[in-house]
Amino acid sequence: MRIQKERANAKINLYLDVTEKRADGFHELKSVMQAISLFDVVTVKYLPSKETRIKLTVKGRYRLAADNKNLAYRAAALYLERASLAADIEIILEKNIPIAAGLAGGSTDAAAVLRAMNKIFGRLFAERALLKLAAELGSDVPFCLTGRTALCEGRGERLTKLSSIPPLYIVVAVSDEHVSTPAAYKLLDDRFSSFDGSVETGSADRLRSMLSDIKRTRLASKSLFNVFEEVILPTCSKAAEIKARLVALGAEIALMSGSGPSVFGLFTDFASAERAARNLCAGGIEAYYAQSVNR
Ligand code: C5P
């Protein structure tokens, strides 16, 4: 048996704007994503076999259906199909990343499965080919494969690696409000007239200043932006409250990640971030301290 263990990091969006609704129903994005130190552990076990069998087990803090709809399962199935291989695969997910929160929990597990499978099978796919498989699985999966800091365009799958930013001291907090990603995009369509140009969203200026900040390895709060805040926070009062509390606890800025409802705060140092995370947890809010990951 061959066993491959991978760390599957969560992401936050430092910048997220939607610029267009496409004919295929997806939306054109401009997003700066950052990998963070909150992670799931993904173990892939391989046994040679004439027939493909994939077994998925989910452990840890969060429960989810361990069936063939899970993105990690689908990643293993897709890898074997494209490699024309049969194998006995067991996937074990140890979940620490909150589910359906805008932190790419499912996407990062799928990316970790692709990485593990490629190691097990002697790197059958080069980086570009693996990124293509990732894009078939979901818009955030290619970023999760590469991690670090990147500008994500297109549906989210077109990556430009960016230089490393200085360490970020992050508190990620999650409310129990449920946000479905397609429903969040529908709210955006309603708010911004399906992006026909009649209603402005973020601003190109902000993205320019974010990218130049990153180049100069500093990050100004005013460059951070998430277009989803405008449509999600009014309907998710707990997420809006968490955002206000993060600022009250000393965050330089607090912003929703992805389509929410998770909110992250950026702090100037480890001690104040840790204190804020503890304070939120004591108040019954699910909160985690994390750092940016740039390796
Ligand atoms: O690609 P992924 O499976 O993560 O997308 C989930 C849903 O989010 C899509 O079915 C679509 O409704 C919406 N989406 C979108 N535009 C994107 C990414 C996602 O409309 N760029």
Image: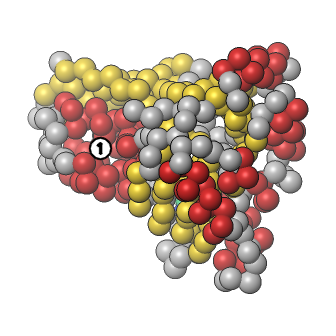
Q: Residue at 72% of width from left, 47% of height from top?
A: 221
In the picture shown, does residue 148 fall above or below 288?
Answer: below
Camera sees residue 239 = yes
Coordinates of residue 196 in the picture (x, y in percent): 67, 83
Q: Nearer the viewer, residue 190 or 29?
A: 29
Q: Name the quadrant where ligand 1 sits.
A: bottom right
* Badge 1: residue crowd in 10 Å (few <14, some 14–19, many ≥20): many
Q: Residue at 49% of width from left, 55% of height from top?
A: 151
In the picture shown, does residue 182 fall above or below 1?
Answer: below
The colour scheme applied to this rendered structure is secondary structure
Camera sees residue 63 = no
Q: How many marks?
A: 1
Q: Residue at 22% of width from left, 26% of height from top?
A: 46
Coordinates of residue 87 in the picture (x, y in percent): 18, 34
Coordinates of residue 129 in the picture (x, y in percent): 24, 54
Q: Within 8 Å: ligand 1 and the Cβ of disc 1?
A: no
Quadrant (top left/top right/bottom left/bottom right) for the C terminus: top left
Coordinates of residue 23 in the picture (x, y in percent): 52, 79
Q: Is residue 250 left or right of residue 205?
A: right
Q: Quadrant of residue 182?
A: bottom right
Where disc 1 sits, the SS reads helix
Q: Nearer the viewer, residue 175 or 270?
A: 270
* Residue type beneath disc 1: Ala
Quadrant (top left/top right/bottom left/bottom right) for the N terminus: top left
Q: Is residue 111 left or right of residue 209?
A: left
Q: Residue at 53% of width from left, 27% of height from top?
A: 37
Say which residue label 1 marks: 77
Q: Quadrant of residue 158?
A: bottom left
Q: Nearer the viewer, residue 217 or 265?
A: 217
Q: Is residue 37 left or right of residue 265?
A: left
In the picture shown, does residue 56 fall above or below 23?
Answer: above
